[in-house]
Amino acid sequence: MRKTAVFADLHLLDNENTVKEDVLKWALQTCKSEAVQLIVCIGDMLGYGQINAAKRLRLYLDNCGIDWLFTPGNAELRNPQDTEAVLQTLASPSESKDAILLDTSSLRLSESAKELLQKNSPAQVYAYTHCPPEYWTPEDAALLQDAIDRGKVAKIISAHRHFDSVKGKQDMLRGLDPDKALGGPPAFVVYDGKSRQEFAYQPADPRLWSSQERRHWLAHLGCSGYRDPFGVLERTRGLAMPALELSYSSTHDWNRLADLVKDWREEGGAWLSLHMPTAAWLEGKISGAEDYKRGVELAMQLGCDRVTIHPPKVQLQDFERSREQFGRFMRESLKPLLQAGRQIGLENVHMNPGENCAQRRFGYTPPECRLWIEELRQGQARPELVGFHFDIGHARNNGEYSWTWPISSWLAELGAEINGYHLHQVSKASEGKLRNHFPLTELFGRMISLASLFLAWRKGQARQAPMFLEIREESSDHSYLALRRLLQ
């Protein structure tokens, strides 16, 4: 068997400036230095089946000087207008003397893949596919088992689920995507018929950074007191937590809270933020104006360093006719903060159940967020104080936009504008829907890996700004302490 590297689940898109590009370049260079003889790409190397991304991937593979094979995953089929061209661009033989490639891009064996398994030769080859056998029909799984029993297939290697598993003759790989790889930084695996060796992209793992770099990252991390600001401040007393975000609510005892904030400041609190209420478009006029103005007054009274705001809550089809009124209202309302040198961070929002790309609200994509940032900067004495507040969980749980605008793409598009972050995990509910604001206690978690943030932060693509753990399912300080323990 040739020394074979297996790549999976990179989810490359048209944007050439994401940290995924760095991961791919590292993986190819590592293959060269390790004298790899064959690279097998087992699907979802593209994120949305875009032809420009496919051509770029093909160029990388051709230029590396190593033989390569490719079998598609479901993500290569996501963009029907490009699918045929993508598959032609990345086409390769489906079998060689030491490998067979099984097409499971439709989440089951293709007819050609079934024929490959039923052939008698070659023997003791490795089979490579995207979708793991647990997803296949019982009939397809039986074909694989028969091929193993006959000695045709020595091992089957798959991906798709973004975590590692080694069970008997079945291996599953977490893949190369810094947005999604679970359990560790992006990685690929090399096989030589006798051993399995993992190569992980170490810059994406902050546990391997210098102690100074880790301390610097933690010096920007803090909590949102979304539901229990008093409890968060009490439980983090004495920790010198650097960042704190309060959420506007007319029910809080703000005098008591101001005393606790004063104590937090004296311990070394550096960034105080207020999450502003949302202004909405209702029956042809702005709703929530009084609360919005009160939020600005409260931010001034508390001595906030910044505020987080949402885009106007307006349906896409109503945006243009409401734009002038909303822009004027928000610029005038926020002006006192800018005059006082306070930052304003516009937060990305996300697709909701029942919405689709045509019927939705404004503010779900990087171009829309950039547009509104520029709208708010108009006529301001210090427009540079208006920036982008990046909610990582909203980017991950954003319907189809999570394919076309994953976390790494947001960081590439708007990283230089960032003045704040919301961090939280996304969880899949029993009915299959994704839900936000779950505890974030791992670096490379189930639905969100922080690897893209670590890489963009470290290379200077994303501005280093306060990060607020916006957890609603339990207290945010639990996640704060968990991440501190991992990185101290």
Image (cartoon, helix red, strand yellow):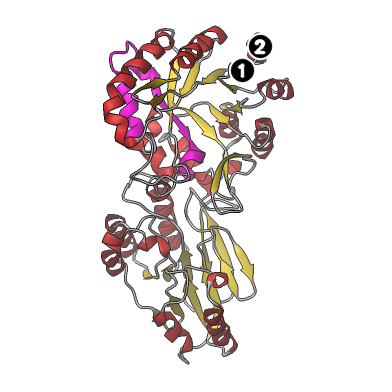
Dots 1 and 2: beta carbons under 8 Å? yes
Q: Which mark is residue 310?
A: none
Question: Magenta stretch: dominant SS?
Answer: helix
| Magenta stretch, residue numbers | 368-396
- Quadrant of the rendered image containing residue 80: bottom left
Q: In the rendering, at what x and y percent does residue 221 appear?
A: 58, 29
Give residue 266's mark.
2
Q: Position of residue 187 (x, y in %)?
A: 52, 56
x, y percent for residue 33: 45, 61
Residue 370 inside the magenta-drawn segment: yes
Residue bearing mark 1? 269
Name the residue at the front extreme.
283
Describe the element under mark 2 as helix, strand or loop.
helix
- Give the amino acid at mark 1: Gly
Q: Image check: 38 left or right of 134? A: left
Q: On the rendered image, what quadrant is the C terminus found in?
A: top right
Say above or below: 11 vs 106.
above
Q: Inspect this view and state whether residue 193 appears.
A: yes
Q: Amino acid at mark 2?
A: Glu
